Image (cartoon, grey):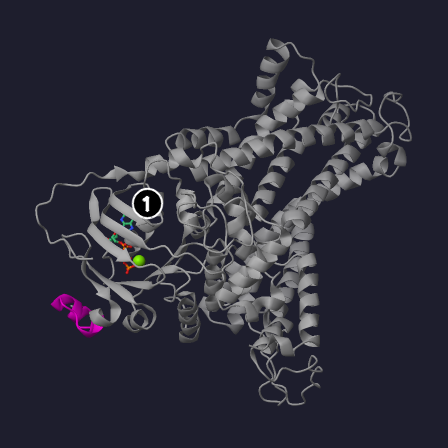
Amino acid sequence: MTDNPGVDTPAQQPVPVGVGYRANAGGPDSDAVETLALPVAAGPSPAARPALRSELREPDAPAQLFGLRTRDVSAWFGDHKVLERVSLTMPAGQVTALIGPSGCGKSTYLRILNRMHEMVRSACLAGAVLLDGEDVYAPGRRPADVRRRIGMVFQRPNPFPGMSIYDNVASGLKLAGIKVRKDQRDHLVESSLVSAGLWTEVRNRLRTPGGALSGGQQQRLCIARSLAVSPDVLLMDEPCSALDPTSTRRVEETIAELRGRLTIVIVTHNMQQAQRVSQSCAFFLATHDTPGRIVEAGDTAQLFGNPVDPRTADYVNGRFG
Amino acid sequence: MTSATDRIAITPEEHASMTTTTETAPAAPAPPAAPDPDEQRRIRLGGVDAGTVRTNLGAAAGSLALTWVLYERVLPFSGAFGFLIFWYLLFLALSWAISRLQWDVRTVRERLVQSLVAGSGLLVVALILDQIGYVAFRGAHAASHSNFFTQDMRHTATLSPITSGGALHAVVGSLEQLGLATLFAVPLGIAAAVFMSEIGGRLARPVRTVVEAMTALPSIVAGLFILGVWILTLGNQKSGFAASLALTVMMMPIVTRAAEVVIRLVPGTLREASYALGGSQWRTVLSVVLPTARPGLVTAVVLGMARGVGETSPVLLTSGFTSQMNADPFAEHQVSLPLYIWNYVRYPSTDMVARAFAAALTLMVIVLVLFVTARLVGGRRPGELSRRQRRLVARDLAESFTHPSDGTS
Ligand SMILES: Nc1ncnc2c1ncn2[C@@H]1O[C@H](COP(=O)(O)OP(=O)(O)OP(=O)(O)O)[C@@H](O)[C@H]1O
Ligand SMILES: [Mg+2]
């Protein structure tokens, strides 16, 4: 939870992740069809739970919560190092906000958490990302499985334009190769849309294209789409930056309702938003010649009300030059 | 909503979303408002105004008259083509002069360029219409006899009357060869396009270069290739299947190129969304990339088919020629429409030439049908509603109007 000031630590070995991913993607079992058991028996014991969870739970069922922790995560684009030994704990069932000036590596960090970083060809990384104590970069772990447990909402709403609202929400099942019965799928789509706060607005036009919604509705559709595969963690990269204040408020309400049901990590440039939605917070900072690192992290109220580091105080109070 | 000043058209869809969010939803759709007496006059922008039309008509009539006088009475020229050129040039000059009387130089120059561009467009359309019209005119004689579409040439000699013989065997051959070639070329082409745009890597560039070179491959070379490999080396008969292989060689690069372009147009954010949901690479391609690119892919396929159906030289070397119906593309010679045309148009008898033109007309109709079908089947842009979807939406809306209260939040 603290930063690592530039003490002379042994240099980390970058792991080229792109290659490994490409090799995995076409693997023979990369599309194994998993069957689904609904409703899930409440609270399976952690020991009985398979390492790669494949069952779905209903979004409104009591869920087991999983925290996320990173240990000494560094990241490179080619030779350009953009993150330096970031260690952070994102507590289970809470909302963690990542703040910091533009270009300090927040998006990169977020994409490392669910293995989207390795989609960039030149990307490398070092360190460990622990979901429920298991490294998501462990050898043999399939990126697709990691991403299903750690969902992501992007800055720009990106519903699938060729699919209806219904199909958009259900698309995660299809993409992850999960077979469900029709009535279960209907139920899942409805509960995901309810969780995302969109149900009342679209219940009468589930068959219309997702692209025909307003920007704010599209973003909530994307949230519903992520929720439909019942992830343990939801990552949000500036989810409200393309939205008007009303839609922003609706998304924030959605986040507040989701809190306690899954772990949320949100990147935001809006200090008020960070204060409103998050319980813990991390402040990232990079300068011209040093890669991004965490200056201060901890309880949101503490970080905004009584920051330890003067740079944090400057940033959260808008005095940053 | 009913006052005269703020009449805003509310589409049923918006209406539905309103009923779901407001407490006071109307129990039934509002009756259409009465015609508004003091509705504002609308100004249509960007249309053609009367002044331009009059100027152009005047210039056209004046130049026609002047051309006639000069061309037919004064100058020692004759011929329709020269007449048209002369008329067009005079029209430009005259419309310049007439416009100059009304507007300043800049406006006139603008209009002149417009006339030039419109003239070129019209010229292209006229040439195409001329081609189609000429073929239709020459082919109508034979095509108007129903035996042309029900018989083959088995019992037809050079001097047989037009009421005997037809091109049914060539139509069947063309469709079968095209169908087989499409069956081979489309999966191959789309797979190659997916490889180049989605998987990429070091091999993508040479593949792309080869494909690009193949689009410029002379069609006779494709025919020679199949002749050399499939028929001479492997010892197979000339057949419809061999012809379809040659057509595949012609069609595949076109499908690949066009498909790659449209697949590249699929936004990367959609791929990211798919991966972030836990999709594997090929699931992403199958469920997200290809469906999003579907209208463009249909165009790519049609482009390839239109190219293939008219090819003569690959077919010439590989399918053999027969005047009899042969529905089996895998055995014996099989004739197709281009080959039929090529063969019979060289006969000295006018009836044979008429049959060839009727076959050309048939070929054009087949291409037309192909294009129209493709538009109907896959032309919808992603996000646009199909007729069935629209029906569903209408039904949902009707339900929301009959139970408006349960939509409130
Ligand atoms: N695909 C990429 N290739 C090379 N460098 C990249 C790439 N993406 C990001 N970077 C670099 O990584 C650094 C961190 O970028 P990142 O997008 O994580 O910043 P950020 O904190 O999210 O900024 P913002 O608040 O503007 O979104 C930047 O210096 C950027 O130039
Ligand atoms: Mg960012």
Left or right of B45 in this view: A121: left
How many numbered marks are there? 1
Q: Quadrant of residue B243?
A: top right
Provide the chain ID for the residue under circle 1: A
Residue A145 appearing in the image? yes
In this rendering, the answer to whether B169 lies above or below B44 is above
Residue nearest the observer in this picture, B291 or B350: B291
Q: Position of residue A22 (x, y in %)?
A: 38, 36
Left or right of A121 in this view: B51: right
Residue that extends furthest to the left in the rendered view of this protein: A8
Q: Position of residue B68 (x, y in %)?
A: 68, 55
Residue nearest the observer in this picture, B125 or A59: A59
- Identify which residue is drawn at 37% across, 35% down: A140
Residue nearest the observer in this picture, A22 or B373: A22
Residue nearest the observer in this picture, B329 or B93: B329
Residue B91 appearing in the image? no
In this rendering, the answer to whether A67 lies above or below B225 is below
Q: Quadrant of ligand 2?
A: bottom left
Chain part drawn in magenta = A304-319
Instruction: Kindly identify which residue carries mark 1.
Output: A134
Q: Quadrant of the C terminus of chain A?
A: bottom left
Q: Element type at marker 1?
A: strand
